[in-house]
Structures are given as structure tokens and as C-alpha cells.
Image (cartoon, rainbow, N blue to C red):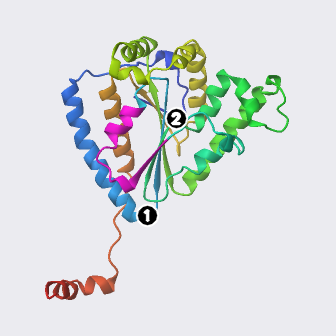
């Protein structure tokens, strides 16, 4: 895992497999312990009611986002975590600015919000397919020629400002890029085709986007380097091994959130504390 902050990241030089080799059973055992701790921490976060946590997951098709969400957040109280999977924008969403649908899906204080694909699609998919920008009906954008470097500079600035605003108002931000190799993606796509019970996951569009692999890597790298900040860091997670990737994400969350020493369950007010025995007596005498 690489925490991308204040230094340039080159995805070509980063491994897509974890540095240490563990058996699947051992990885799952470690994850089980950590996610229980995360679940307890979320209960405290809910009672504290000062912070929210935004977990952003990005990665190429088949990088394991869905299964990671299922396994990492399995021990959370259902009221404490909300997952949003962002697809192609609807007509309603396109009638607003590109950040609107992400803003209204943000977690409230005391909760975790997990965004499966995020506002970064607007500087990834749209860079590979700049014609999509024309569908946003933006002032001054009349042709693909208008979607130039100055346009992307402004969009990156908007994203950085958006995340700074969230952090300043109590949202703890984690951004994970699941770094998958092209060979492993091929294997996973073939698995979807070869296993009948996995067929429903396959889309011919995955093969179309696979042809743009190098472009996506280039734009992911730029997005990470331009938007990894102390208040909203990017973490590059080797994703060829799904159980290892899940453990790395869970470990990162637990380690970072444990540093917030002010996240504590609120104490009872003095009057209630002084009358605990009286309240117990009243209940026991019913």
C-alpha cells in the first residue's frame, strides 16, 4: 500500500500484489478481528456525533470494490453505514452540477458513507471520453475543443475545494484506488464468462473500456497526484489479491481513525449520573 501525499506517484512502478504472502484463511482471520474493532468504533462515532467518515473507492472494472464493501463493513450496525454506487448520471443528476449527486449522498454526522465510484469519475471517464462533458450543458462548452487543459485544471480545483470544505466541517475522508493489473482483470473477466453463476456480472462494455487501459492509468495517476492532500489522502491498494486488499483497507481505516482521541462516547450529565441508583430502583420495583 502507498499513501500518496506530498509526493508523486507512478502507478507503473507500484506492485499490484501485496508485499507479503499470506494464506487466504489467515487474511480472513485478520480481517475479522479488525472489522469487529471498526464496528465498535463506528458505534462510538455515532454516539459522539461530531464526525462523519467518507470512504471513496475507485478502481478499474473487476478491481473488487463490491466484495470489499461487503467484507470490510460486515460487522457495522446497519444504521451506521450507507453505501452509494454511482452509475451513469440520470437526467435529473445531469440537470445539476456534477458534484450535486455526490454531495446529497454524503454521510451525516456519526455515520460512514461508502461511495462505490465517486466524484472522481468526472476527471476519469470524462477524460477518456471528453464528449460526455457536452452532456452536462455547461456554459462556454460548445465542442470537445473547449474541454481543454484549463477546463481540467478548474475541475481539479473544484474537487480539491469540495473535499477541503467537507474536511473543515467534520468529514474524515479516505480515498482508495484499487490498483489492479491488466492480466488479473483479464482473468476476472474470463471467470465471469466461464462461470454461469457469474455471467450476470459481465458487460460487453467492460471490454470496450479495457481498450482504454493505458489512458485510464494515466488519468488515475494524474488525479491521485493532483488531489492527494493531508485532509483527503489517496491510498493505492494492491488489488490482485482480494483478501489482502480488503485487509489493507480495513487496517488503514482503523489505524487512522484510532488517532482521533476526541472520538469518545459522551458522558451522562451530572443529574442523570447522580440518580442512576434511583432509576435502577424504579425499574426493579415495577
Residue 105, given in percent of the width and then of the height, sits at: 54, 49
Q: Is residue 6 above or below residue 97?
A: above
Residue 253, given in percent of the width and then of the height, sits at: 38, 43
Per the rendered image, the range of residues in magenta is: 66-84
Q: Is residue 165 above or below residue 277?
A: above
* Secondary structure found at label 2: loop
The residue labelled by disc 1 is 49
In the picture provided, is 75 more to the left or to the right than 91? left
Whichever of labels 2 and 1 marks the residue nearer the N terminus, that label is 1
- In what quadrant of the picture does the C terminus appear? bottom left
Residue in the image at 27% along x and 43% along y: 34
Residue 251 visible within the image? no
Residue 241, given in percent of the width and then of the height, sits at: 33, 22
All told, the count of numbered labels is: 2
- Toward the viewer: 134 or 235? 134
Residue in the image at 83% along x and 25% along y: 143
Q: Local crowd at mark 1 within 10 Å, few (<14), some, or many (≥20)?
A: some
* Secondary structure found at label 1: loop
Residue 242 visible within the image? yes
Residue in the image at 70% along x and 44% along y: 97
Residue 117's label in the rendered image is 2
- Toward the viewer: 266 or 43? 43
- In what quadrant of the picture does the N terminus appear? top left
- Quadrant in which residue 64 is drawn: top left
Distance, label 2 to label 1, CA atoms, is: 26 Å
Question: Is there CB contact under 8 Å for labels 2 and 1?
Answer: no
Amino acid at each position: 500500500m502507498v499513501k500518496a501525499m506530498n509526493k508523486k506517484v507512478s502507478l507503473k512502478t507500484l506492485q499490484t500484489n501485496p508485499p507479503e504472502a499470506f494464506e487466504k484463511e489467515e487474511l480472513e482471520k485478520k480481517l475479522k478481528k479488525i472489522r469487529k474493532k471498526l464496528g465498535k468504533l463506528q458505534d462510538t462515532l455515532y454516539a459522539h456525533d461530531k464526525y462523519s467518515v467518507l470512504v471513496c473507492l475507485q478502481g478499474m472494472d473487476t478491481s473488487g470494490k463490491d466484495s470489499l464493501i461487503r467484507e470490510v463493513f460486515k460487522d457495522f450496525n446497519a444504521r451506521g453505514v450507507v453505501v452509494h454506487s454511482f452509475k451513469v448520471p440520470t437526467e435529473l443528476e445531469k440537470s445539476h452540477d456534477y458534484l450535486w449527486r455526490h454531495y446529497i449522498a454524503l454521510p451525516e454526522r456519526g455515520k460512514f458513507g461508502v461511495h462505490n465510484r465517486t466524484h472522481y469519475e468526472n476527471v476519469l471517464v470524462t477524460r477518456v471520453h471528453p464528449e460526455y462533458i457536452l452532456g452536462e450543458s455547461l456554459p462556454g462548452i460548445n465542442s470537445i475543443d473547449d474541454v481543454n487543459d484549463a477546463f481540467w485544471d478548474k475541475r481539479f480545483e473544484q474537487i480539491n475545494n469540495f473535499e477541503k470544505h467537507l474536511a473543515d466541517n467534520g468529514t474524515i475522508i479516505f480515498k482508495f484506488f484499487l490498483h489492479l493489473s491488466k492480466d488479473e482483470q483479464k482473468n476476472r473477466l474470463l471467470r465471469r464468462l466461464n462461470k454461469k453463476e457469474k455471467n450476470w456480472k459481465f458487460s460487453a462494455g467492460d471490454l470496450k473500456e479495457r481498450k482504454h487501459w493505458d489512458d485510464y492509468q494515466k488519468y488515475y495517476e494524474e488525479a491521485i497526484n493532483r488531489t492527494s492532500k493531508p485532509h483527503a489522502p489517496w491510498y493505492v491498494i494492491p488489488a490482485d489479491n482480494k483478501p489482502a486488499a480488503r485487509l489493507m483497507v480495513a487496517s488503514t481505516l482503523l489505524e487512522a481513525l484510532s488517532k482521533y482521541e476526541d472520538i469518545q462516547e459522551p458522558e451522562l450529565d451530572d443529574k442523570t449520573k447522580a440518580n442512576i441508583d434511583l432509576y435502577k430502583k424504579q425499574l426493579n420495583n415495577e
